[in-house]
Amino acid sequence: MQPKARATLSPEAKAAAFADLRQRAMACVKCPHLAASRKTVVFGVGDINAQLMFIGEAPGADEDEQGEPFVGKAGHLLTRVIETMGLKRDSVYIGNILKCRPDTPGQSTGNRKPTPEEMKTCIPYLHEQIDLIQPRVLVALGGTAAEGLLGRAVYITKMRGQWHSYRGIPLMLTYHPAYLLRNQALSEKRNHWEDMLQVMQKLGLTISEKQKGYFRGR
Ligand code: URA
């Protein structure tokens, strides 16, 4: 689906529209089971004028506790990746398809995948975030996020590294950092890094020889 044509807002109007969106999302009870189980709504974090936006699937326990996306172990890896790209975490925007942690009734630990229904219910908030921020590049982190965005099955090991278009913006599919923590193969780190090099290239960022060489097998 293409975004509605939007006249460029003044910085003040954009900040006000973003604050309004945040307020609506923070009070959302469209999924009563998630509204009942969450500690916080995890709206998103970063620069609302960012050129680059990362999209994950849903908050986990750490994010639900702290109210910020990607603050657990996977989040630390994402922050390292962003910094290895020569950027700062607060210069990009990080959000999720689902703003609430998927509930896990009867379980005290662990996460579950958001359901297609939950993603469909929540994604309009992400659309508004994307349409207000208007980043130059989107990155979907992992198969579930990619499925939520593209609305079809995604085999991330096959489809990573490919460009798509989402709401008129180039979208790169890549691995979720949690996958890279589970799978320590150098080849997978390199694959993920190659995706990030493509993102850097698309953004017109300077890529050093050192950056080009990361995770190349000897
Ligand atoms: N995984 C996600 O997809 N999003 C988060 O915010 C944290 C972990």
Image (cartoon, rainbow, N blue to C red):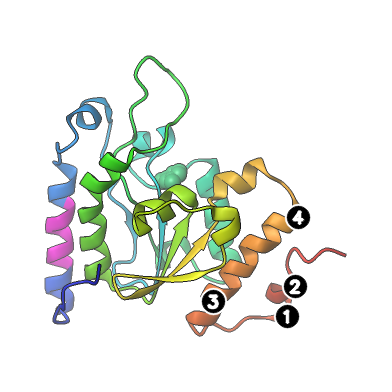
Q: For the residues marked 2 and 1, what is the alpha-carbon distance in whole angstroms?
A: 6 Å
The residue stretch that appears in magenta? 15-22
Depth order, front residue of 83/56: 56
Q: Decide if ligand 1 comes within 8 Å of the CB at mark 3.
A: no
Q: Residue at x 18, y 62 (%)?
A: 18
Question: Considering the image in quadrants, where does the C terminus appear?
Answer: bottom right
Label 3 Cα crowd, 10 Å radius (few <14 / some 14-19 / many 20+) = some
Image-based side of 48 in relation to 85, left or right? left
Q: Residue at x 14, y 36 (%)?
A: 29
- Do we see residue 183 in this rendering? yes
Q: Which residue is mark 1?
A: 209
Residue 186's tag is 4
Depth order, front residue of 61/180: 180
Which comes sooner in the sequence, label 4 or label 1? 4
Ligand 1 location (quadrant): top left
Q: Amino acid at mark 2?
A: Gly
